[in-house]
Image (tube, rainbow, N blue to C red):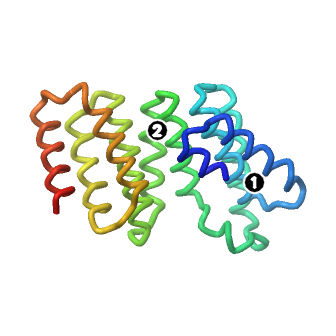
Amino acid sequence: MSHLAAQLGNPREIAQLARAAQEGARGRVTPRAEAMFLAAEARGHALMGDAHAAQGAAGRAVSAMEAADADSGDDPVWIAHFDEAYLADELAHCHRDLGQAEAAARCARQSLEGHPETRARRRAIGYVLLATAQVQQREIEQACSTGLKAAGLLHGLRSNRGAEYLEDLQQRLEPYREEPVVREFGARMELQAAA
């Protein structure tokens, strides 16, 4: 539910739903599931601009994931996909939303290192997160190059979410629209959309 709230742009609900999941499952949830709930809470706080609350929830998520790695035998099937790479992805979102470009780039790279090639959509999102962090650091040429990697992965997929991420990246590049590399990136996006 908190992921749906994120897609709908309701950050307060993200944090509230994640906390409700934590409260409802207290003492009956595995550390991996707890890490996922805490990461969702951190994203909600980050979207609201509350760095302190986001960092607190993110720190608890990392600790829960460390405990999960030590004992993952009791995890339910529905949580098996949530691993260090997914957590790094969630934390990259938090840092991006808080304007912490260096930390966002670091987490996006960790996510990309952990997601296998078979997770094309997740890797594409990781590339967009990294590109966004590069824009925040004013590394425009790198951002465009990284964004093209994401677009290449998403080209063969039908992913509305992936398209939204690319659109967000293009909006973040808008202040640099006069730079040749940004114009070329935009032209390539248009060609890909037409294909």
> Residue 146 appears at what percent x and percent y?
27, 48
Q: Where is 175 relative to 85, above or below? A: above
* Marked residue nearer the N-terminal end (1 or 2): 1
Instruction: Return the residue nearer the eye: 132 or 164.
Output: 164
Question: Looking at the image, do the residues carrying marks 1 and 2 touch, with CB atoms under 8 Å apart?
Answer: no
Instruction: Return the residue nearer the eye: 16 or 182.
Output: 16
Residue positioned 23% across, 33% down in the render = 140
Q: How far apart are the alpha carbons under marks 1 and 2?
A: 22 Å
Amino acid type indicated by mark 1? Glu
Q: Residue beneath label 2, please?
A: 104
Hey, which residue is sitting farthest right in the picture? Answer: 27
Quarter assignment of residue 194: bottom left
> Residue 70 appears at what percent x and percent y?
73, 63
> Residue 7 appears at what percent x and percent y?
53, 47
Residue positioned 33% across, 47% down in the render = 166
35 to the left or right of 184: right
> Residue 125 appears at what percent x and percent y?
41, 53
190 to the left or right of 65: left
Amino acid type indicated by mark 2? Ala
Q: Residues within 10 Å of mark 2 (few under 14, many from 20)?
A: many
Secondary structure state at the residue bearing disc 1: helix
Residue positioned 73% across, 45% down in the render = 17
Quarter assignment of residue 27: bottom right
Q: Residues within 10 Å of mark 1 (few under 14, many from 20)?
A: many
Q: Where is 49 relative to 83, above or below? A: above
The disc placed on residue 5 is none
Residue positioned 38% across, 69% down in the render = 117
Secondary structure state at the residue bearing disc 2: helix
Q: Quadrant of the C terminus?
A: bottom left
Q: Residue beneath label 1, please?
A: 34
Please tell me how many numbered marks the rendered image carries.
2
